[in-house]
Amino acid sequence: MVQKVVMAEVSGYRDVVARIARAAQACGRAPATITLVAVSKQQPWEAIEPVLAAGQTVFGENRVQEAVARWEGKSRGLTLHLIGPLQTNKAREAVGFFDVIETLDREKLARLLAEEIQKQGRSPRLFVQVNTGEEPQKAGVLPAEADAFIELCRRRYGLEPQGLMCIPPADEPPGPHFALLAKIAERNGLEKLSMGMSDDFETAIRLGATSVRVGSAIFGARQPRGG
Ligand SMILES: *Cc1c(COP(=O)(O)O)cnc(C)c1O
């Protein structure tokens, strides 16, 4: 019985891995050039454990506290990505805990991250989040401000972002947003593109994603957050 449940959960994972490989091959890319970030937010440990056991080592979380609670003491050999908005009062903890912070999007955060990186001697890789749909409720720098912000990170704060991240509007075709992100990355000399989720990761791969952030297609529906 237990065995059956475990098999079912890993089959979602295996399916996503296979779809990534097919999408890569379909556009002449090597599957190994695309990192799968398994988004474990709001998932019970019973859903995560079999995916870990199957060999997945890269996980994404969108809240600092929740990530620490889930992964503290278990993160050896793993790569943990922060993919949710980072409040400035959590910058210290985020620098101490995550391997990749994908949501650098404002000057104050750049300053605090630079200070913490200095203090802690620990340098998570950084992505700049771009609000490609210019949605007021969404985090990220506006596309028109991205070049200047990247320059500011480099010149004033000595930060060298590796790439860009976006979350397209839920009600629009994602392709144009992915293409825009790729264009901004290219003109700024950034190599990494974090784009594509459960519903659109194949499109993102076609448009150059170097990492995709996939949650529900691997683990199933998320549990609602308590209190
Ligand atoms: C939750 C989340 C995902 C994963 O979404 P799915 O649709 O479940 O794949 C990806 N990126 C971000 C930023 C998220 O918050």
Image: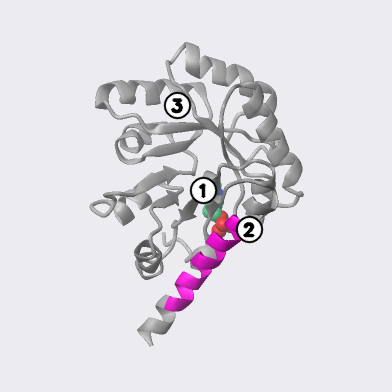
**On-image quarter of the N terminus:** bottom left
User: Horizontally, is 221 left or right of 207 in the view?
Assistant: left
**Label 2 to label 1: alpha-carbon separation:** 12 Å
Tell me the tag on residue 32. Answer: 1
Tell me whether the residue at label 3 lies in contact with that at label 2, contact meaning CB atoms closer than 8 angstroms. Answer: no
User: Horizontally, is 19 left or right of 219 in the view?
Assistant: right
Q: Amino acid at mark 3?
A: Leu
Q: Earlier in the sequence, mark 3 or mark 1?
A: 1
Q: Position of residue 13 (x, y in %)?
A: 49, 65
Tell me the tag on residue 22. Answer: 2
> What residue span does the magenta drawing correspond to?
7-21
Residue pictured at 47% horizontal, 66% vertical: 223
**Label 3 to label 1: alpha-carbon separation:** 32 Å
Between residue 103 and residue 100, name the one nearer to us. Answer: 100
**The residue tagged with tag 2: helix, strand or loop?**
helix
For label 3, the residue is: 109
